[in-house]
Amino acid sequence: MAIPFLTPARCVLLVGDEALYVYNVSFKAAKMLAAVPWQSDDFEETVTGLIRKECKGKPVMILNDMTDQHFKGGQRMPRVSPLDRFNVVKRKLQVAFPSYPIRGALQVKQSRGKKVVPEEGKVKGGGGLYLFAAVPMSDPVAKTVNVVHKSMASIAGFYLLPIEAADMVQAIAKKVSGRKRKPARWVIFIGQHQGQALRQVITRD
């Protein structure tokens, strides 16, 4: 679920509770084009026009920031071959979130005291530790996917903002603490979006 920043030319649609925020992202900058309320009479025409004309039909990245996101941490997988791991994770995701059509899993590192286990969370006797996430097919999400299809642009991916912001929070924490001070294990970030909404991101290790 990591955003591919190596190819940053994108049209980013930030799905919020009040509106859909449209950004034109190039190799040099990110520019907010508009905030389109969900109840706008010309919602489809406005967003479609922005994707086609302002973003020149670039691949669309959907970044979900709605409050209705569900997470289950500490999901340990059995030790299986790499070829079978995908199917095992997929089955467990379906059991964990049977009524949510949008589901995903992220393998995380496991901490023991102050030591982080290497190799992406692989631990002795198990197949790794995962964070499960799910999003309901709400009306805003459905409208966003539908308008992208109507614009004829491709979808580069669907991502959850709290998870994608974790690396940014860690980078800011290291910069603030400086080289002489060791970064804290717990980091709390509170920010305010252009649409006035607040976002809290809390990370550990």
Image: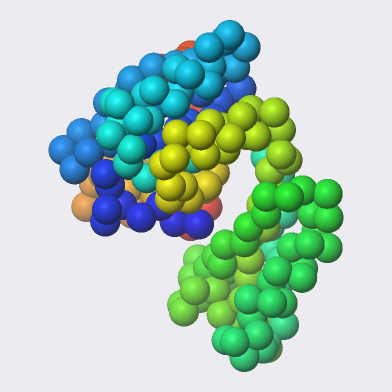
Identify the residue shown where x is 45% and y is 34%.
Answer: 151
Identify the residue shown where x is 38% and y is 30%.
Answer: 51
Identify the residue shown where x is 49% and y is 74%.
Answer: 120
Where residue 191 sits, quadrant-wise, is: top left
Identify the residue shown where x is 57% and y is 62%.
Answer: 106
As drawn, the residue found furthest toward the left would be: 28
Q: Position of residue 153 (x, y in %)?
A: 41, 42
Q: Is residue 184 above or below residue 200?
A: below
Q: Is residue 20 above or below residue 159?
A: above
Q: Is residue 18 above or below residue 135?
A: above
Residue nearest the viewer, comparing 156 with 168: 156
Residue nearest the viewer, comparing 118 with 44: 44
Q: Position of residue 173 (x, y in %)?
A: 35, 44
As drawn, the residue found furthest toward the top would be: 41
Q: Position of residue 142 (x, y in %)?
A: 65, 34
Q: Is residue 143 visible from the viewing direction of this image?
A: yes
Q: Position of residue 12 (x, y in %)?
A: 40, 36
Q: Is residue 70 above or below residue 142?
A: below
Residue nearest the viewer, comparing 97 with 169: 97
Residue nearest the viewer, comparing 66 with 130: 66
Q: Is residue 113 visible from the viewing direction of this image?
A: no
Where residue 144 sits, quadrant-wise, is: top right
In the image, is 178 to the left or to the right of 119? Answer: left
- Describe the colour scheme in one phrase: rainbow
Q: How many marks?
A: 0
In the image, is 2 to the left or to the right of 39? Answer: left
